[in-house]
Amino acid sequence: MNKIGLTFAILLVAITFSCKSQNFFWSHRGVVEEDILDLTTCVEYGLLYNSYAIDYSTGDTITSSDEWTIPTYDQAKAFADSFGAGGNYYWNSAGKHLKDTSSVYWTSLHDGATNDYNFSARGSSDRAGVDGVYTTQKIDWNIKLFNTSRAMVMYNDTSRIAIAIGSYEYNAGRSLRLIKDATGYSTGDTTQYIGNDGQIYNAIVMPDGNFWITDNLKETLYRDGSIIPFHGIDNDTSFTDAEWAALTTAGVCAYDNDVSYVGCDFEWPTLDPCFGYLYNWYAVDDSRELTSSDDWSVPTTTQHDALISYAGGTTVAGGKLKKTGEIFWQSPNTGATDDYLFAAIGGGERDGVDGLFKEMKTSGDMWSSTAYPFAPFTGAYLINIAYNTTSLNTPGGETKKTGLAVRLVKDATGIPDGTTTTYPGNDGKVYNAVAINELYWTTENLEETQYRNGDPIPEVTDNTTWAGLSTGAWCTYDNNANYRCK
């Protein structure tokens, strides 16, 4: 057992509780950390979330399992009552049992704080929804309650818990704690909660009969692995005050846009997009086969046309097939909804005439396996998706020397839309795929460097050499290896 774990175990053995045994756990990551961490250089206030980020009706789930939930209004009242609120959710002395005793997290007043249960409420403050301005830190602790604009609040200069029932802004930023039913356990029993980011939080059974986590949440991912939005269009690390105030969708932030307040070594998730490889059409058409089995193939232009028709036709299908957001597409990414999880991205292209790279994040063209049969052109068909429209088409005549992305298809007769599978490539890389209209489509751009027989597909970086090719080749956009995904 490490030093922190041993200290935690000793303290739990040493502390006795006079409160009646109940059935719930609250989480706490790093109990008694005041004794272990140098709090002058490492503080842990967690993150601030707006209510859209925890609204399960959107389908996004911030907890890693259904056992753990965000406290409801009724659960918050029961929690306050278990510490003597007696139904009075404004004037009471319940808060003193729960506030961190350190002046690092509260002003010197932190009235009567005893932190009897290592719940460690800290003055993390909040961010106003009306103007996006942060209130003074170390003055109050607010946590959001589930599917409501209400909050549970503690203050530095009083020992009360307040259950705010006023009309708080839905887009205000406040801390989060989680709870889990603790039937069969006793007050003071402990467990752990592992979040979507892999963070481990300690939790303890409180007198209300629930496990509560005992640190403010600092999760940046939903259960499905998608990122909770944490920045606007002005930069990659934060929302401006105006952007935050205008949000009508999920948002999370660090106090004062400063990650040093969140926790030790906290970092926002990486937003560097990856786009896969670009191939000329000769690689697509090579008899040595770009795919690892006959079950999978580069789609024909007829299959592209069928996909477009199924997604509503050429005027709207582009929006329904594009990945949402502005990481993989330039703003405004018009009409992107990704209804079928096809996840088309703006990987750009390499010009077949001069070998120059262009249209990164504005164009997401992908090759078909169908050559263009009409003279005088000797090109091939592709599917064309763009950032600034919901329309798309399948033009022919594109020179075979052009570098475009490649997706694959496989028969999925009788398979419902949305069913997923994987495709193992020639390089051993594994790609995700989803069923759409009885075809599996890979949802990632290909990154293969060899044909089925093991022969290498040459990587060509020189522009002039690329433009002169009549055999298969691949490259990354701008010859930048950081754009590869695997």
Image: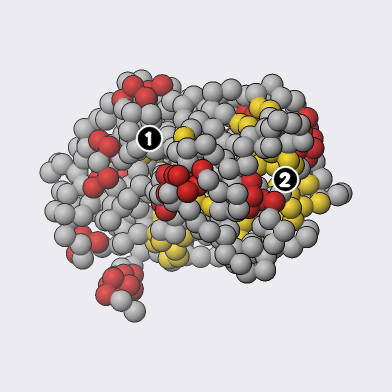
Q: CA distance from mark 2 to mark 1?
A: 39 Å
Q: Earlier in the sequence, mark 2 or mark 1?
A: 1
Q: Crowding near pointer 2: few (<14 within 10 Å), some, many (20+)? A: many
Residue 383, x across and y down, in percent: 66, 35
Asked where in the image residue 396 lies, by quadrant, the reply is top right
Which residue shows up at 36% across the image and 58% down it? 28
In the picture, the quarter occupied by the N terminus is bottom left
In the image, residue 87 above or below residue 43? above
In the image, residue 29 above or below residue 4? above
Asked where in the image residue 126 lies, by quadrant, the reply is top left
**Image mark for residue 484:** none
Secondary structure of the residue carrying numbered label 2: strand
| Three-letter code for the amino acid on which mark 1 is drawn | His
Secondary structure of the residue carrying numbered label 1: loop
Residue 154, x across and y down, in percent: 30, 39
Which residue shows up at 32% across the image and 72% down it? 5
Residue 61, x across and y down, in percent: 55, 45
Left or right placement of residue 65 versus residue 107 in this view: right
Disc 1 target residue: 231
Q: Nearer the viewer, mark 2 or mark 1?
A: 2
Which residue shows up at 61% across the image and 67% down it? 455
Q: Which residue occupies the foreground of this view, 58 or 353?
A: 353
Asked where in the image residue 81 lies, by quadrant, the reply is top left
Disc 2 target residue: 369
